[in-house]
Amino acid sequence: MLGLGIIKGLVETGRNFVGSYFKPERLVTIQYPEKHLPPVEAARTIPFLVYDGKDSMKGLRCTACTICETECPPKCIYIVKDTVKKPDYLGKMQNQPKVFDIDISVCMGCGICVEVCPFESIKMDQVFELSGSDRFGAMLLHKAQLVKSNDYFGEICHEQATQINAARADDVRKAEAKAKADADAKAKAAAVAVSNAAAGVAAVAASSMTATPGTTQPDSKPAPKAASTSTPLPAPSKPTVPSATP
Amino acid sequence: MIDSLDQIFVSLKHWLVGLTPEAWQPLVSILVSIVPIMALFGTCFAATTIFERKILGRAQNRLGPNRVRAFGVKTFGLLQPIADGIKMLTKEDIVPFAADKVVHFLAPVVLTTPAWMLFSVIPLGRNMAAIDLDAGILFFFAVGSASELAVFMAGWSSKNKYSLVGSMRAIAQMISYEVPLVLSTIPVLMLAGTLSPSQVVEAQGVGTGFFAHWFVFTPWGLSGFVVFLIAATAESNRSPFDLPEAESEIIAGFLTEYSGFKYALFFLGEYIGLFAVAGMAVTLFLGGWQAPCKALEFIPSYLWFFGKFAVLIVFFIWVRATLPRLRLDQLLALAWRFLVPLALINLVVAALWHFMGSWQFIAAMPVRWGICAMLVVLPFVWFARLLNGGKVAPRKYRYAE
Amino acid sequence: MAERLLLANIVMLNSIAFYILAVITLAGAVAALTLRNLVHCALCVAASFAGIALIYLQLDAEFVGFAQILVYIGAVAILVLFTVLLTRGTEVQAGVAFLSRSWPAGLAVTALVFAAIAAPILLTPELHKLAADSASAPVRKIGEELMGNYVLPLEVIGLLLTSALLGAVVIAMQDKKD
Amino acid sequence: MLPIVKYLWLIPALPLLAAGLAALLKKERRASAATLAIGSMSISFLLALAAFLPTLSHGEHGVFRECFNFTWFEFADNTFQSASTVQLGWVLDPLTAMMLVMVTFVGLLIFIYSVGYMAHDENFTRFFCFLALFAAAMLGIVIANSLLLLFISWELVGLASYLLIGFWYHKPSAAAAAKKAFITTRVGDMGFLLGMLWLYSKTGTLLFYDGGNGCLEQSALIKLVAETTMCGMAISTAISILIFCGAAGKSGQVPLHVWLPDAMEGPTPVSALIHAATMVAAGVFLMARIYPLLSASADPATISTGLKVVAWVGSITAVFAACIAVAQNDIKRILAYSTVSQLGYMMLGLGVGGVAVGMFHLITHAFFKALLFLGSGSVIHGCHEEQDIRKMGGLRILMPITFATYAIGMLALCGFPLLFSGFWSKDEILASAHHWQISQIPFYLGVIGAFLTAFYMTRQMFYVFFGSPTVSPAAVADTKAKHSHNPHSSHSHEPATSIHESPPVMTMPLVILAVFAVLLGLIGTPAWPWFHGYLAGHSPKVDLGKLAEDAGLMLVSAVVVFTAMGLSWLVYSKVTLQKSREVDPLEKAQPFFWRLLANKFYIDELYEVTIIRLNKAFSVLSDWLDRTFWTGVVTMISHLTVGLSWLSRKIDEDLVNGGFDHGCDGLRESSRNLSKAQNGQTQFYFRVLGIAFVALVLALIWRAK
Amino acid sequence: MTPLTHYLIFSALLFCIGFAGAMMRRNAILVLIGIELMLNAANLNFIAFWRYGNTEAISGVMFTIFSIAIAAAEAAVGLALVIAIYRHRRTMQMDKFDTLKG
């Protein structure tokens, strides 16, 4: 009969009304500014740039390859290459961005930049309190505002960060082994000719290899030092292109 | 003592009018009636906005607004209307470029003015109708129908397809539901024998002894009341009949291009219309300001009126919290295939009830009740079945359950 | 003295009200028949109807006034608006004359007609009379008349309205063949 | 008046309503149609019982009789003072009550049976519509207190019979049979109609009983008896003989019996209901109803000519049909001739012994003949529409219930002594015939008929139920099981392969009818003739001595029956065991007589060469007259007319039209000028309106001045 | 205060405005509106005469009530006709509707 369903519905909402005063656990509302919901790993808002180590500018993974700029559907990324290069975690010299801007009022949070980045250098953030009082300027984030440390990434996306770190450590280990093998081969070749000089070079190269994954092994003291010191040094050998991360 | 408490506002008005020079008394008398009504129902409007949101929230296991503070004091959100009001009034008034500016401006005014006028005939207490019109109920429906024009003006002048669709929906809905709305009141007018609201209320006080003689406590009255409530909900464009403003379909219907103060006026007009219809429902079916029995007459009449009024408003809010929106065809089918036939049958039932009132034999009362109740319930069930039609198969869930 | 003053006051207010309403009504009517946008015309005519309803009230004919509002504003005006929308009357065509070709003849005839009505009115001295102080047509009396003397016209009107309703539906219904 | 009398019309009205509703049903609503018909019939049966109960008590004047009459219409005819109205009405007396119970009860059983029998028929709904229509009409006959109402119902019964015989109208034989039945009975009905009109013109009323004014009551009878017509016959006798024509047509008396055997083309329930139990008995009922008229004679001591005619026709029919039945091979045809023969018995009983004797046989016959027909229907149904008894055999094993009930019906029909109802009713007829004053020949004819009846029924039993089936019972049981799984697939034409017992809905009525076929005799034995007392309006006493009085006659009839059955057994028991059953042993012995009998004494052929040929000759004559003589007359008249028209046209065209055309031209010209004012411009009309208004005002002002 | 003449003149003006509109506008809807205005002017006369005459006899009021009802019927049928005509002729111009000319 018409009306019974209506009465059932009224009873349900009536119970909710009364119940919400007596059973606080019924309430689904979070008092937001004071309380937050626990973060969800898959959540994403806007992109940020990841850096390793302490120095945000030196440890920046971005190589200014501009793949993300090309791929970005709303075209909210703006990159200018720097003329100066810097070494990456494998010690190879890479380009670095001079300007890296994202207009987050244009960004739609699709995450395509993250998908296409070959260097794991751009990731999606979980911050959402992004309001600003300036209609135009406040929403245009510059490189300095965009950088966040790999530790932070580990915090918000623990699982993914661990995987990436492991992969990168693996790369380093492989590169080391390769370098060592090369060094051995060279040493053998050089054993006939010059043996003393080669040993010194190999040692330096090895120390620079171990330095990069410093973020994952914060206790490894020589990492920053080695990174900083190894910058001016030329690559000791051709240590294979950093194995393309999936 | 009780009487003077009951008539305190009436005496106050007389005293105030008496203070002025005699030549000005007609004007002053009018003003003294209008100002309190506007103040009172304006406050009601403010209160209803916050309580509606509170109740809606609680009915959906949320908290509702609770954050407005005044000078650092927590008010549990009670000052929300003031904050809203300030926000509304200070917002930019945007008029679309293509809009018909004059009509666009006039629409909220045309909507709100008649809505306020509706209160003038509703008796808020004993001797407390602003004007005791002989044809008050006709006045009520006549003025109430003016809002259709306003809705049309709003929808058409915005030059926006959503607005136009919304206003067309609203007009179709209002015209359709005006028929059962008026038809459902006719039994009351027939049995009360008057078109004056105060006399209708008095007719419901006759013989008040142990049990209230409100019209809602008769078979035809109950049926009429239900039809009236449904039609009133639709007339005031409230959920589940809020198709004209369906946010999820046509943005906000005829309100789409309104902002700021004009939007607030529309908002006000709708709520005032709702109050007026609720007040009319109280007057027609729930005994107006009458107490349910002699023993309770020490409570002043206006308190009775506002008590019933508040119950109805809460009921409207409750319904809004519960029911989902209807489809347009369902809406019109409900009006023409369910409410109108029921209201028409109800006319006959009321006439029967009246004539069976002269029966003298012993079991006359139960027989009268039985026949009338049957004549009300059977068509209800039958039309409900027809309405459901059984065309739609029960929903099957592929994964759930 | 005071009573007479009071009465004079009310009467004066009343008659001022009439002139205001008359001006509004006439303005509405003129606007309705001169504006180019049909929706504006319909809205203006609604205003004019409202003015007439208020004049009825001013003439103490409550019931008729409310009936006028209910029927003309609640129904006829809406009907006109719907018709305007259904016939795409809102599209004001530039360059198409909104007056018929023979409008000067019409104007002349109108003037003649007005003269023919107004002259007898002005020339009949009996019509320069004033109204009684108060009058009322109570609803109950109207109802009794409707059910008594006028019961046959009432029935006929009911039939007329029903057939008009059905006729309107049938006429305006879309042909199935189209 | 008892309320049941006032509402007696409900008994036929309910089936009529059911028929009307069933006619509106769609073809697929089979269950509804059956429910409607059976439900209405059950209610009618209950009402009939309710009507039956009060008739058990006798009124002051002997017989309980109450009637309800009303005026149908009046006409301004001043020839008769009292004849300006036509009245209809219904009557409740023992005759009516007994017939009501019989018709509704047998009808109900047959309706139920039909559900099973017609289960696979496409036009099931239509069938029940017709059945209900028939029941309504039959009940109308029974309750009628007016010869006119009776006649109306009578014709409706004929219509229903026509519809039902031709139910399978796609079979040419069925269509022809229906037509034949309709036309043949019409011949009799002509007499009925004439008799009725004569009666009306003489008495001014057609009501049977009307508080002393009815046509069957004393005052009318005296008037009718007093007048004589040609050959010195009393008018009452002449009228009753005319009405008897109708009865003879309906009841298949010689020479109008020819339609009844052909009517077996209809579905078997129809044969059982209409052509055995009810409709054909309507003739006998009619005779019983007008018995006062029939038996009226100036001198109460003498027997009226009407009764003599009835008795003679009945006795001749009894033997005649029985003879034919001996040589038939179609199971239903045998039963049909048997029916004709038994109807002859009823007429004989009515003629020689009065209402009770004939009606008693009617009632017992209705039950056992309905039983036999339904049994044969069951056999036919079981053998898949096979009706030739020579192709059957051994069914007693395959269809035990049908066999048992059929045997009971057969014994009742044969008049097997003491136990079976047929014995008592037939014996009574024979006894009455024996005591008849006029002649002993009807008695001897009756005895011969009884002998033949027993003979051919035994023959039929042997053919159908004894002997060996063509397949072994085990194999039959096997196919039976298969058959029950798939009832629709077994439309093969090998009768023996899937012969099966009929469903309970068919056998149940058989059992009930069988019970009645046995027990019903007990209400009319000579020792306790309750039935006669009931009809006559007095309570009989049990008197076993009466039994002894008739013992001699009973013995004779018993001997006759046993002899016939024994003879039949001798002839056919051996034959049926042989495989060569195609040639009947009697046919071998007497081929000429056999052929005569098998061809029904060539009655149909006789009609063919006499009446029908005469009819054809008349048609040819009419055709010739039409083509030559009348055509000439018509042609002459038409030429005359053409000449007159030519003259008329000349006058019209030259004289009248000339002036008229001129006038029209003038009118058209002026209209064309005037119509220019109507230019279709609404606003122009407005302007004219305005100017007219101004002119009006000016005129008014000018007049006021 | 206000003499009856004023009402009558007002009503005459209203009537003439309606009449002029009905005569001069090309649009069929406006012609109907003009007719409605004329009807209203007539109604106003009824009420005015009632008010200025014997107010006990309410035939003026009754006539107005019936007149309003008839006007409603007229509007419904008239506008339906307008819609039907528009559907067939695709125009609202009154001077195009001259199929019935003589």
Image (cartoon, coloured by chain):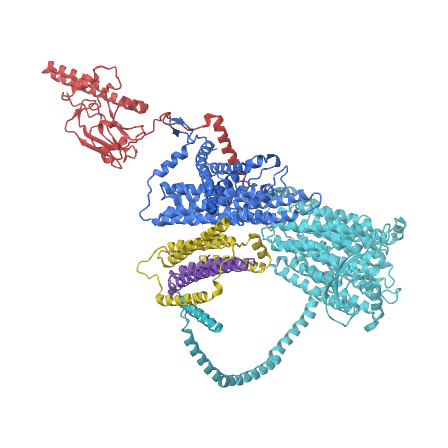
Chain colours: A red, B blue, C yellow, D cyan, E purple
Q: Nearer the viewer, residue E9 or E14?
A: E9
Residue lying furthest left = A193
Q: Is residue A229 visible?
A: yes
The number of numbered discs placed on residues in the rendered structure image is: 0
| Residue ID at (75%, 54%) | D100
Q: Is residue D523 left or right of residue C96?
A: right
Q: Is residue B21 left or right of residue B194?
A: left
Q: Nearer the viewer, residue D477 or E19?
A: E19
Q: What is the x, y in percent for residue D433?
A: 84, 59
Residue A56 to residue D127: above or below: above
Residue lying furthest top = A196
Q: Is residue D502 left or right of residue C39?
A: right
Kindly indicate the quadrant of the structure image that contains residue B225.
top right
- Quarter holding the N terminus of chain D is bottom right
Kindly indicate the quadrant of the structure image that contains residue A103.
top left
Q: What is the x, y in percent for residue A188?
A: 14, 16
Q: Nearer the viewer, residue C39 or A181?
A: C39
Q: What is the x, y in percent for residue C158?
A: 54, 57
Q: What is the x, y in percent for residue B285?
A: 56, 42
Q: Is residue B393 visible?
A: no
